[in-house]
Image (tube, grey):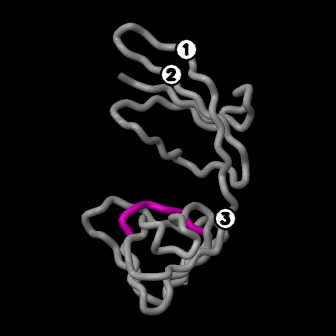
């Protein structure tokens, strides 16, 4: 079974920002970041041996604005309790790993900036691509 997924910036799906097909997964991470502080609309269709379904009813979500985020304790990058924001840093965020904290990176991510006064530890077994967004900085 495969799923068609569309994300658009309008409810009528005239401005589609992602149009893809996935199989064997229940989550989707867009290959490029979605615009910040924007309401996006999404829908799915299913394809199996019987054919392809019509598009589902559209649902919506709003992306957040980039934030300034600091670690509050040692832990995994993907653990929201490690961060003062209560969520995992994402595209455009300015991130600081505070003195005395060790944060283990186990995911890909693109940030506005990364400041490390503590320890930034890479998980050698994970496939990840840390990157700083255009115009950002790492120090």
Q: Which of the two discs, 3 and 1, labels the residue nearer the N terminus?
A: 1
Instruction: Work out whether residue 3 or residue 139 is closer to the camera in this orientation and state it.
Output: 3
Residue drawn at point x = 35 percent, y = 78 percent? 121
Residue 90 position, x and y percent, is 55, 62
Please give the residue where the numbered disc 3 appears in the rendered image: 66
Please report contact status of discs 1 and 2: CB closer than 8 Å, yes or no.
yes
Please give the residue where the numbered disc 1 appears in the rendered image: 54
Per the image, label 3 sits on a secondary structure element best described as loop
Res 119 → quadrant: bottom left
Res 14 → quadrant: top right
Per the image, label 2 sits on a secondary structure element best described as strand
User: Which contiguous range is marked in magenta?
Assistant: 105-111
Residue drawn at point x = 57 percent, y = 19 percent? 55
Residue 101 position, x and y percent, is 42, 86
Q: Residue furthest top?
A: 50
Residue 108 belongs to the span the image colors magenta = yes
Name the disc covering residue 45, or none: 2
Please report contact status of discs 2 and 3: CB closer than 8 Å, yes or no.
no
Residue drawn at point x = 49 percent, y = 46 percent? 29
Crowding around mark 2 (Cα neighbors within 10 Å: few <14, some 14 to 19, many 20+) is some
């Amino acid at each position: 079974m495969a799923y068609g997924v569309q994300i658009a910036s309008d409810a009528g799906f005239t401005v589609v920002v992602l149009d893809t097909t996935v199989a064997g997964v229940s989550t989707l991470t867009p290959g490029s970041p979605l615009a910040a502080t924007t309401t996006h609309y999404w829908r799915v269709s299913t394809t199996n041996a019987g054919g392809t379904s019509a598009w589902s009813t559209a649902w919506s979500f709003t992306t957040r604005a980039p934030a300034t985020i600091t670690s509050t304790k040692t832990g995994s990058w993907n653990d929201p309790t490690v961060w003062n924001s209560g969520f995992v840093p994402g595209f455009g965020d300015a991130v600081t790993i505070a003195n005395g904290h060790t944060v283990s990176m186990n995911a890909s991510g693109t940030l506005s900036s990364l400041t490390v006064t503590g320890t930034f530890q890479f998980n050698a077994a994970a496939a990840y691509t840390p990157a700083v967004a255009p115009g950002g900085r790492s120090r």
